[in-house]
Image (tube, helix red, strand yellow):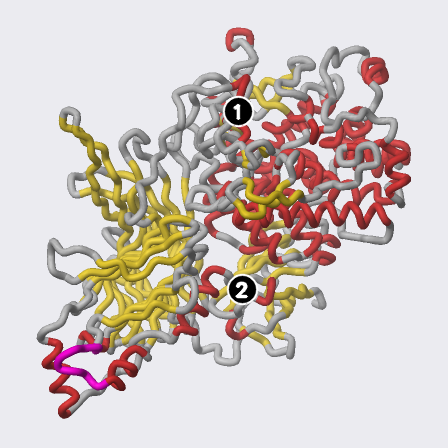
């Protein structure tokens, strides 16, 4: 077999630790029995562990995920096919082993040996490195802050919960890496059970590092269960005298480094060279008079037993410490702005390093290391540090503001019950008492920006990965202008994340929805104009932008948005499970709970390119998501229940199209034809509608049978909602996979019909569409472009470009996404802004341009003057000015 995939390390990230990437294969190229081989630039074969993540309809492999140790990889690598699956290396006798023992598992991964109990109060109870115990019991920990009152006096009580593991699953086992999945909840001493967790631990062969993906779900009472702290606590044996015990934290610049007993004394004076050697991290082997002096001062000096680091905001962290003496205060040790989050402590038996990915970006992160003067210390990795103010999940008001602030409905629909948060962190064991500064900073850099291999844009494009999209070209003035706008849009949002401090455990990754130029601020306090929550699919815009350019900074933006949107914006348990909350001041604030916010289409890109296991949980939650429509009819407020035949409603887009994305993902991951059948049932129902795909888009919907029932030509919220939430991309990809030419013809007719003059629409539909408007035509450009390509209609192609270009070009104004600079505005010395900006417009305009360039590039005007002439007949109004 000659088929191979060439990949490169994104952004020249540090190549260390185990990494997983995805490969896409041509249909018919490889099957379940096919093997894979990994080669470096020099042709050397490197051990690799592989699994299949998706299939083509004919049963051949579509996507595979591969894991290897990045320390052994070059900047570019090749994955090749071989006749049979199997693990081959120069030393095939060395492999990771998982042995089932009494009440648990024993993982042997070279020098690392870990005992994992079946279930109970810990993830592991012993970690041995080269036969020596380096860590003990590791347990999830939770702190809730509960309000209390006595008459007019009010306060809050801190309540501690410890994790109880209810299920242990070997999710992946192989010669290089094993993935252990833990499921459980936190339980208090009085038996109160709260906040379920799903934790994955990754163990690699010959690695000194344990990596974790830590998910928790909120099932508390928002009025009394305030999140004060959540993380993982584990025990660490320490040996050696206090002066040979050290602690380190990364700061803004350089490393904070102290010992439990600093040998800088007044009387008797310890020789200066000893103290200097101590602060260099050298092991002190004292004897004679030096030992006598040190032993004397040790009898009369404080020992520092506990250190705590908390990044409490995106612009401030602090380190504090205290002795083990009860009822004594902490001392402030250091204040700074942002730390990457590397931390370590150790003694003569070695050191432990900790790092949380995106430490300051997902504040309030932190660590507590206590018991540093004892034989066994306790380390807590805080995903939400108790050093910060407790998280309040309540809504900002007791109602909705539909008409004024675009909140969907006037009743309150906010609830955090069922949302989740996922963090990543790593623990590493070193032989030295304390790592060097370079080792600690290198470790945190690798955790925050792990190696990630990806293919070239042409590779994904040639395989039609995720449907139809264009590669950049700058052969004409207008092509260059369009590419400039696409680049500017990405750059603007990348800068806005930093400029607006869009950070925090529950915010990082998301964008705001609409800008307020008068306040020089996004409308963070105005209902539906605040957090975007995947409205008009910025996810698809960013992922396709990455695929077509390969730019690592776009991958990072898209990755963070995927992690946030797949967790915080949607419900993973409770009555809204599988639905998401529409854009709002709080991510869970809008009364509109819809499938489109949660759909798999947002996140398939990241899953197939990285093999991320957490998304498998989420896809599993979504596979039968139609049943949530019995709990929450998306159009319940528009139709009378007593007049309905089917129990719910689904618009062909975005409701049914979102379900199709979920079913498509389940079908291709497992070749489960039940989910293909679900798609086909709805397609056939739409084909029977009077105007086929143009019909509706409101349908009655039966979740039990997944049938759609035509109920006339109504479009709750507007016809544009049918195609602005990712439906065109979903429809194109699924019709290609299914080979359904009738559906393709329907999409082409839809794109053509959308741009017909009003009178012609009425005539062609026999007046059936009534007063239904086909508004915001630039959002239909992908469908119009597809129609022009499919029907070979040059006039439709030019019409599509006219609508798309007009949304950005008015009266010869070619400024596009031009950034304005303001002095002393918005709390910035120099503020950059686009006064008219909305994420709705940016995401849809960019996405439609990316798709239209693939289908109708030949109809695009060559010069800006020609573009002006094309759009001059259009109205002077545009979406961005609305």
Image: 111 above or below 834: below
The percent coordinates of residue 557 (x first, y second) are: 57, 50
> Where is residue 643, by image quadrant?
top right
Q: Can residue 300 be seen in this view?
A: yes
Disc 1: which residue: 703
Q: Can residue 169 be seen in this view?
A: no
- Could you say which is closer to the camera, residue 440 or residue 174? 440
Residue 269 is inside the magenta segment = yes
- 1 or 2: tag closer to the N-terminus: 2
Image: 42 above or below 686: below
> Is residue 579 shown left or right of residue 716?
left
> Is residue 596 shown left or right of residue 417?
right
Q: Is mark 1 on a helix, strand or loop?
A: loop
Q: Is mark 2 on a helix, strand or loop?
A: loop
Q: Distance between the residues labelled 1 and 2?
A: 42 Å
Q: What stretch is highlighted in magenta?
A: 263-271
Q: On the rendered image, what quadrant is the C terminus found in?
A: top right
> Is residue 262 shown left or right of residue 662?
left
Do residues under tags 1 and 2 come within 8 Å of each other at their CB atoms? no
Q: Residue 451 carries which label?
A: 2
- Could you say which is closer to the camera, residue 579 or residue 616? 579
The percent coordinates of residue 585 (x first, y second) are: 47, 31
Q: On the rendered image, what quadrant is the N terminus found in?
A: bottom right
The percent coordinates of residue 76 (x first, y second) are: 63, 70
Closest to the camera, between mark 1 and mark 2, is 2
Q: Which residue is drawn at 60% across and 55% down?
A: 553
- Could you say which is closer to the camera, residue 180 or residue 137? 137
Image: 674 above or below 278: above
- Could you say which is closer to the camera, residue 548 or residue 464? 548
């Amino acid at each position: 077999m000659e088929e191979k995939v060439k990949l490169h390390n994104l952004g020249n990230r540090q190549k260390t630790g185990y990494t997983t990437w995805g490969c896409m294969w041509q249909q018919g190229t490889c099957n379940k029995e096919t093997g894979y081989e990994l080669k470096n630039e020099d042709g050397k074969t490197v051990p690799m562990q592989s699994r299949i993540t998706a299939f083509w309809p004919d049963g051949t492999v579509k996507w595979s995920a591969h894991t290897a140790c990045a320390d052994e990889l070059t900047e570019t690598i090749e994955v090749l096919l071989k006749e049979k699956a199997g693990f081959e290396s120069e030393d095939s006798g060395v492999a990771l082993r998982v042995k089932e023992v009494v009440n648990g598992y024993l993982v042997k991964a070279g020098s690392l040996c870990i005992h994992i109990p079946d279930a109970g109060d810990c993830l592991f109870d012993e970690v041995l490195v080269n036969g020596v115990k380096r860590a003990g019991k590791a347990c999830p920990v939770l702190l809730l802050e509960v309000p209390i009152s006595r008459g007019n006096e009010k306060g809050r009580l801190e309540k501690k919960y410890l994790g109880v593991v209810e299920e242990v699953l070997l999710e992946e086992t192989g010669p290089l890496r094993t993935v252990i999945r833990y499921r459980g909840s936190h339980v208090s001493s009085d038996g109160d059970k709260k906040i379920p967790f799903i934790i994955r631990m990754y163990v690699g062969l010959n690695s000194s590092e344990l990596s974790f993906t830590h998910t928790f779900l909120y099932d508390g009472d928002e009025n009394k269960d305030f999140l004060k702290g959540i993380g993982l606590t584990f025990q660490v044996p320490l040996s050696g005298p206090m002066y040979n015990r050290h602690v380190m934290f990364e700061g803004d610049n350089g490393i904070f480094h102290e010992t439990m007993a600093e040998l800088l004394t007044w009387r008797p004076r310890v020789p200066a060279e000893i103290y200097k050697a101590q602060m260099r991290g050298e092991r002190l082997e004292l004897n004679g008079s030096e030992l006598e002096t040190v032993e004397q001062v040790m009898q009369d000096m404080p020992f520092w037993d506990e250190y705590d680091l908390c990044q409490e905001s995106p612009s401030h962290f602090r380190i504090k410490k205290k002795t083990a003496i009860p009822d004594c205060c902490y001392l402030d040790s250091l204040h700074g702005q942002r730390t990457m989050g590397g931390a370590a402590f150790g003694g003569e038996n070695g050191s432990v390093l900790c790092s949380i990915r995106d430490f300051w970006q997902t504040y309030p992160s932190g660590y507590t290391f206590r018991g540093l003067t004892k034989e066994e210390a306790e380390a807590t990795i805080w995903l939400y540090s108790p050093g910060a103010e407790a998280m309040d999940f309540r809504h900002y008001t007791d109602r909705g503001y539909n008409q004024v602030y675009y909140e969907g409905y006037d009743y309150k629909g906010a609830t955090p019950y069922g949302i989740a948060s996922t963090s990543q962190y790593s623990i590493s064991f070193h032989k030295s008492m304390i790592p060097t500064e370079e080792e600690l900073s290198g470790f945190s850099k690798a955790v925050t920006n792990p190696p990630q291999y990806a293919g070239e844009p042409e590779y994904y494009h040639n395989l039609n990965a995720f449907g139809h999209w264009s590669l950049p070209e700058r052969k004409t003035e207008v092509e260059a202008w369009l590419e400039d706008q696409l680049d500017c849009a990405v750059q603007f949002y990348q800068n806005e994340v930093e400029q607006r401090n869009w950070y925090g455990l529950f915010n990082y990754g998301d964008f705001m929805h609409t800008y307020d130029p008068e306040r020089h601020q996004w409308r963070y306090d105005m209902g539906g104009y605040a957090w975007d929550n995947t409205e008009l699919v910025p996810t698809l815009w960013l992922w396709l932008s990455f695929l077509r350019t390969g730019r690592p900074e776009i991958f990072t933006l898209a990755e963070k948005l995927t992690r946030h949107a797949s967790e915080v914006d949607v419900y993973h348990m409770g009555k809204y499970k599988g639905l998401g909350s529409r854009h709002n001041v709080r991510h869970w604030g809008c009364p509109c709970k819809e499938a489109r916010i949660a759909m798999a289409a947002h996140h398939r890109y990241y899953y197939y390119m990285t093999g991320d296991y957490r998304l498998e949980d989420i896809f599993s939650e979504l596979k039968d998501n139609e049943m949530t429509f019995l709990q929450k009819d998306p159009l319940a407020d528009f139709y009378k229940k007593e007049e309905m035949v089917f129990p719910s409603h689904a618009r062909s887009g975005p409701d049914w199209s979102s379900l199709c994305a979920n079913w498509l993902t389940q079908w291709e991951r497992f070749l489960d034809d039940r989910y293909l059948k679900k798609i086909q049932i709805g397609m056939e129902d739409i084909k029977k509608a009077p105007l086929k795909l143009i019909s509706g888009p409101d349908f009655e919907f039966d979740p039990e049978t997944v049938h759609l029932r035509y109920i006339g030509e109504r479009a709750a919220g507007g016809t544009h909602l049918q195609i602005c939430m990712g439906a065109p991309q979903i429809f194109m990809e699924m019709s290609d996979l299914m080979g359904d030419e009738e559906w393709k013809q329907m999409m082409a007719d839809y794109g053509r019909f959308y741009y017909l003059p009003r009178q012609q629409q009425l005539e062609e539909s026999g007046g059936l569409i009534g007063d239904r408007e086909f508004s915001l035509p630039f959002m239909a450009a992908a469908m119009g472009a597809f129609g022009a390509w499919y029907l070979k209609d040059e006039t439709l192609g030019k019409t599509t470009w006219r609508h798309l270009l007009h949304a950005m070009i008015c009266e010869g104004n070619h400024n596009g996404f031009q950034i304005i600079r303001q002095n002393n505005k918005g709390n910035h010395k120099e503020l950059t802004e686009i006064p008219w900006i909305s994420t709705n417009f940016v995401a849809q305009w960019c996405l439609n341009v990316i798709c239209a360039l693939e289908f109708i590039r030949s109809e695009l005007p060559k010069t800006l003057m020609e573009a002006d002439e094309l759009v001059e007949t259009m109205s002077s109004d545009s979406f961005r000015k609305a």
